[in-house]
Amino acid sequence: GGIITQTPKFLIGQEGQKLTLKCQQNFNHDTMYWYRQDSGKGLRLIYYSITENDLQKGDLSEGYDASREKKSSFSLTVTSAQKNEMAVFLCASSTGGENTLYFGAGTRLSVL
Amino acid sequence: QQKVQQSPESLIVPEGAMTSLNCTFSDSASQYFAWYRQHSGKAPKALMSIFSNGEKEEGRFTIHLNKASLHFSLHIRDSQPSDSALYLCASSNMGYKLTFGTGTSLLVDP
């Protein structure tokens, strides 16, 4: 089996700050994803990467940048944190296409 | 843009009851349909998935898919307190973009 590690687990930022979230996977999966979850609700896709060096925008990419540094890692940057923003950012990986997504435990973001 | 909606938003059932969760999707070209479960504070985990119209059973869990009505559902037989969680449905048109629903929060009352 494999594991997805997200760092940090908790992130507190200031309004307007640029914040970076990191994700590592050891499944050797090609495809990686970043989703946002608000208040225990559904997941919204921010960015995904089909393979190393690829980046695709999801439905919620405005205000975010992403970087697929290598096959095993995928980073997400909040370009300008919004005041009172609270959400959980979930990283996932899969072998691609319609296959099962494996999720990390998430990074909880709070903006003061 | 694919829209995926779930109902109900929340549900309380007694232990041992049958639980039914619903999901509607907007893209008639969707080919892949899945359910994920997320216990409080944990990562979502895949439960089961289906590609073709009809039903698929795995243990106490059954998926029904009706593409013509843009609807699929999850049924949990003999619901247990450990089934209490947020249930997320998801669909895609066989691309890489998996769209999730709004979630149903299930509480199984012992």
Image (cartoon, coloured by chain):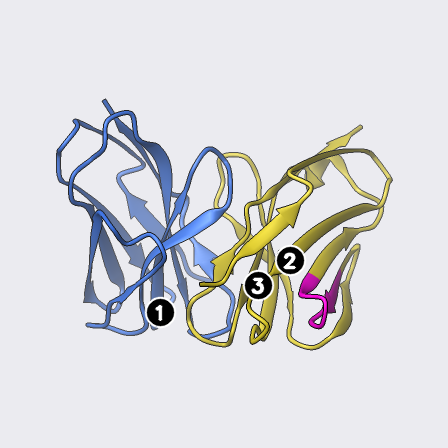
Chain colours: A blue, B yellow
User: Dividing the picture into quarters, in which one does residue A31 lie?
Assistant: bottom left
Residue A40: percent from the left, percent from the top? 50, 36
The residue lying at 22 percent from left, 47 percent from top is A63
The residue lying at 74 percent from left, 69 percent from top is B66
Tag 2 subunit: B
Say whether marks 3 and 2 touch (CB < 8 Å): yes
Which mark is nearer the camera, 1 or 3? 3
Secondary structure, mark 3, is loop
Q: CA distance from mark 2 to mark 1?
A: 26 Å
A4 or A58, nearer to the observer: A58
Q: CA distance from mark 3 to mark 2?
A: 7 Å
Q: Is residue A69 left or right of residue A31?
A: left
Query: Would you call the spot at circle 3 few (<14 residues within 10 Å), some (14-19), or many (20 or more)?
Result: some
Asked if marks 1 and 3 fall on the same chain, the answer is no
Label ID, residue A31: 1
Q: Quadrant of the C terminus of chain B?
A: top right
Q: Is residue B28 above or below residue B86?
A: below
Q: Is residue A13 left or right of residue A24?
A: left
The residue that label 2 is drawn on is: B24
Q: Is residue A25 above or below residue B31?
A: above
The residue that label 3 is drawn on is: B26
Q: Is residue A75 left or right of residue A41?
A: left
Query: Would you call the spot at circle 1 few (<14 residues within 10 Å), some (14-19), or many (20 or more)?
Result: many
Q: Which residues are magenta?
A: B63-71
Which mark is nearer the camera, 2 or 1? 2
The amino acid type of the residue labelled 3 equals Ser
Secondary structure, mark 2, is strand
Label ID, residue B67: none
The amino acid type of the residue labelled 1 equals Thr
The amino acid type of the residue labelled 2 equals Thr
Secondary structure, mark 1, is strand
- Examine the structure image and report whether residue A38 is included in the region drawn in magenta: no
